[in-house]
Amino acid sequence: MKKRTREKVALLVFALLVVLGGSVLLRYFETGRSWNVAASVVDDAFGQMKGYTAIVYDGTFDSLDALRPAMDPEAIGAEEPASLGAMVLSELSRLPLSMRERPVYASDVRSLYEEKGAGVITLDAADLRRYEKPTILMAGDRKIGVVAIDYYASKKQLEKVRRELTDAGAQSLVCLVPRLSCLATIEGFQAVIVTDDDQAEPGLGEGAEGAHIVYAPERGSVGVVLLTALNVPSSKVYASL
C-alpha cells in the first residue's frame, strides 16, 4: 500500500515538474522574442541594420473617410458643399501645394534603411492586385515571398500559397489583406499587413500565431515591418523624417 502511495506521489511530482518546465520554456521563448525586438529598436536607432530586412509601404488609412458624405443626387452640381465633411474636404483641396505636400515618402524611408545596411523592399499596399499571384522580391540577398489575398482563404489554400513561395526559395513570408478576416489562419507568415480595416488603430502592430499583424497607418505616413536575420518581426510608423 505504501509502495502505491509513493508511486502516486512520484507521478504527481513528475507531472508538476513537466508543467513547470513547460512554463519556463514558454517564458524563455517569449523573453527571447522580446529581447530580439528590443535589439531591433537599438540597432535601428544606431543605424546598424546589416542582416535586417525592411518592408516599406505607404499608409492607406484615410482619416477623412468618415467625413465623406454619401452623394445626394439633388446636391450634385451644387456649388455649396452638401455637408460639413464635404466642406472640410473642399477647403483642404484649396490649400497651396506646398502646404499639402506629404512630410515623408516611402522612397525616403527606403533610402534611410538602405543607408543603415538593411535589405529593403517597397510594397504598394494601395494596389493589392499587384500581388495576387505569389511573388518573390529581393531584399538585398534575401528572398521575400509576398502575396495579397482579398477573399476568404481556407487553411488548405493558405498552405498551398505558402508552399509555392517557400518552394521558390522564399526565406520570409508576407501577406497583404484588406481585412484580417480574409485569412483562416496567419500561421506560417512572418508579417500580415492589413490595409483597409477602419475598426483597428492605424499603425498598430501585434503578434499572434507566430506572425506580426500590422494595420496600415494613415495616408501620408509610411509603415515599416522589420525582420531580423532570424525572422523576428517588429514594426514602426514614420509620420516624418
Image (cartoon, rainbow, N blue to C red):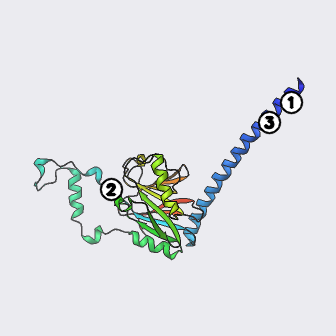
Say what secondary structure mark 3 lies in: helix
User: Residue most toward the right?
Assistant: 2
Q: Nearer the viewer, residue 166 or 47?
A: 166
* Position in image of residue 205 (x %, y %): 48, 54
Q: Earlier in the sequence, mark 2 or mark 1?
A: 1
Q: How many marks?
A: 3
Q: Nearer the viewer, residue 161 or 178?
A: 161
Callout in the foreground (2, 1)? 1
Label 1 environment density (alpha carbons within 10 Å; few <14, some 14–19, many ≥20): few
Label 2 environment density (alpha carbons within 10 Å; few <14, some 14–19, many ≥20): some
Say what secondary structure mark 2 lies in: loop
The residue that disc 2 covers is 62
Mark 2 is on which residue type? Asp
* Position in image of residue 227 (x %, y %): 54, 63
Residue at position x 26%, y 71% in the image: 97
Q: Mark 3 touching mark 2, by CB under 8 A?
A: no
* Position in image of residue 177 (x %, y %): 40, 53
Say what secondary structure mark 1 lies in: helix
Mark 3 is on which residue type? Val
User: Residue most toward the top?
Assistant: 1
- Spatial distance from mark 3 to mark 2, Cα to Cα? 57 Å
Residue at position x 21%, y 48% in the image: 70
Labelled disc at residue 13:
3
Q: Is residue 95 left or right of residue 122?
A: left
Residue at position x 46%, y 55% in the image: 161
- Spatial distance from mark 2 to mark 1, Cα to Cα? 67 Å
